[in-house]
Image (cartoon, grey):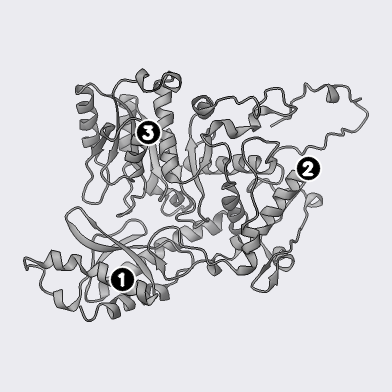
Amino acid sequence: MPWPGALSQRASTPASEPSQDPRPPPHKGFGFAGDRPQEQDRRMVSAPVSFRGISAGRVFPLLPIRVSFPKLSLVSRLQCFLILSFLVLCHQPSCLFSPSFHSHSPPPLRVPPSLFPTLIIPSPGRYTYEIAPVFVLMEEEVLKKLRALVGWSSGDGVFCPGGSISNMYAVNLARYQRYPDCKQRGLRALPPLALFTSKECHYSIKKGAAFLGLGTDSVRVVKADERGKMIPEDLERQISLAKAEGAVPFLVSATSGTTVLGAFDPLEAIADVCQHHGLWLHVDAAWGGSVLLSQTHRHLLAGIQRADSVAWNPHKLLSTGLQCSALLLRDTSNLLKRCHGSQASYLFQQDKFYDVALDTGDKVVQCGRRVDCLKLWLMWKAQGEQGLQRRVDQAFALARYLVEELKKREGFELVMEPEFVNVCFWFVPPSLRGKKGSPDYSERLSKVAPILKERMVRKGSMMIGYQPHGTRSNFFRMVVANPALTRADMDFLLNELERLGQDL
C-alpha cells in the first residue's frame, strides 16, 4: 500500500537526494510465508524476560522464526518489544495448558510467574495508524491470511471481543446492507424482519437479535437432524412461512461446529437456498473454523467460501489465548465502515500525511480495542502453518482414540459417533447397567454426571462439562482441544471416571 504522494515535503525533495522519509513501507516483516525479509534486514532481538529459568535472549535464537524490524518509530519499537515478550509463550504451548481440563474451550493458561510483568504491559489503542502502526498492519495481514483459508482473495474483517460479538456484527451488517436508512432512522425504517438459524445454534444469535432491537421473535428456528445439522428443506419452508406472515427474511446463520454435538451444517445446500432468496449467509465457525487449516478434515466446511461473513475464534481449537476472535467478510465495498463509521474529526482527519485507509478504527463499534491479532500472529510465526495443521489433526486423532477406547470399556456409552472433537458419552454406573428398560432409568442416569462432576472438581483431578440435550439425559461432553493432551491423558480420564463412579 503506497504512502500518499501529494505531500509538499516529498514533492520538494530533489531527485538526486536520498529520501529522508523515516516511515517503513507497510507490511514489511509482518507477512507470512513468502514475505520473509532479506538477510541483511534481519535482527535477532532479545528481551529481559525469563521462562522457567531460561532467558529470552537464549530462547529466541532457537525459535523457528526470524523477526525483522525495519527502521521504526518509537511507537513501533515499543510495540515490537511487546511482541517479543510473548514469543516464548507461543513456542512452548505444552507448558501452558493443564492436561486435565476438558470442560470448555479454550483451556486455562498456566503462566509462569516470571511472565506476569509481561502480561500486564498495557497494549495501545487500535483506532488510528499513528497510535498503533505495527498492529494495524499486523491485523490486516492476519485477516488476509484467514480470508485466504476461507477461500476469498479479497474482502474485509475485524477482530472482535468474542464470537458472540462477531455474530452480532454479522446481523447488523446484513440489516444495514438491505436497509441502510436504519443507521439514521433506526427501527422505524424497518419492516418486520426475519433471520434463520438452527435449533443447535449458539445462544448469541438470539441475544444479538434482542440487543439490536429486532427481538427474539425475529429468529426463526430451523429443524436439525439427529446429528445436529440444519435441514435445508426446513429452512426453505421457514423462509416461505415468514414471507407469508408478512416478515422480510434477510439473513441465515449456519453453524460450523455446534457447541454440544460438534455438528457442521451443510453449507453448500444452505448457500443454494440463500442465493435463491437473496439472503445474507453468515457462518458461525467460531468453534469449527480452525478445521480449515487441516487438509484432512477441511471438507467439513465445504461451501464456506460462498458465505458473506464468517465468525472464527482461533482461541478455541487453536488455543491462541483468550480472546482472539475474527469476523471475516467477503465484501469489498467498505461495508464495515459505512455501517459503523461516525467520522469523529478529532481522530479520523482526512488530511493526514499518510493513507487514511490505514485508520481502521471507524469500522468497528468500539473505539479502544485490544491487540487480539498479536496472539495469532505470534503463534503462526512460532508454529508455522504446518504446526497449526498438526495441532488440529492431533485433536481429531486423540478424539478418535478416546472413542475407540471408550467402546472397549463396560459402562461407557456414546451419544453418537463424533465427526469433530466433541466426544459425547454417558458413564453408566454399576447399579444401572443392564437396566436400560426400567421406567426410572433415564431419571437416574441424569443424576450421574452432576455427581461425578462434583467429585472430580472437589478432588481436583480433572474437569469435564455435561449437559442434557433434547430428550437425552445428562451426558458428558469431552472437548479434545487442549494441545497438551496425549493418549495417556485420555486413558486417565476413563480410569478416573470409573474410579469416581464405582460406588454409584
Rendering quarter of residue 425: bottom left
Which quarter of the rendering shows the C terminus? bottom left
Q: Earlier in the sequence, mark 1 or mark 2?
A: 2
| Mark number displayed over residue 351 | none
Camera-side residue of 233 and 248: 248
Q: Are marks 1 and 3 in contact (CB under 8 Å)?
A: no
Q: Secondary structure at mark 3?
A: strand
Q: CA distance from mark 1 to mark 2?
A: 54 Å
Q: Nearer the viewer, residue 199 or 254?
A: 199
Where residue 296 sits, quadrant-wise, is: bottom left
The amino acid on which the numbered mark 1 sits, given as a three-letter code, is Glu
Q: Mark 2–mark 3 contact, CB under 8 Å?
A: no
For the residue pair 241 and 180, the one nearer the viewer reads as 180
Residue closer to the observer: 113 or 160: 113
Q: Residue at x 57, y 42 (%)?
A: 369
Q: CA distance from mark 2 to mark 3?
A: 42 Å
| Residue ID for mark 3 | 281
* Residue drawn at (64%, 29%) of the image: 357
Question: Is residue 88 something that shows in the picture?
Answer: no
Res 472 quadrant in image: bottom left
Camera-near label (1 vs 3) is 1
Amino acid type, residue under disc 2 in the picture: Ser
Q: Using residue 364 as the reference point, say whether residue 494 is left or right of it.
A: left
Residue highlighted by disc 1: 454
Disc 2 designates what residue? 73
Q: CA distance from mark 1 to mark 3?
A: 41 Å
- 409 over 17 or under it: above or below: below
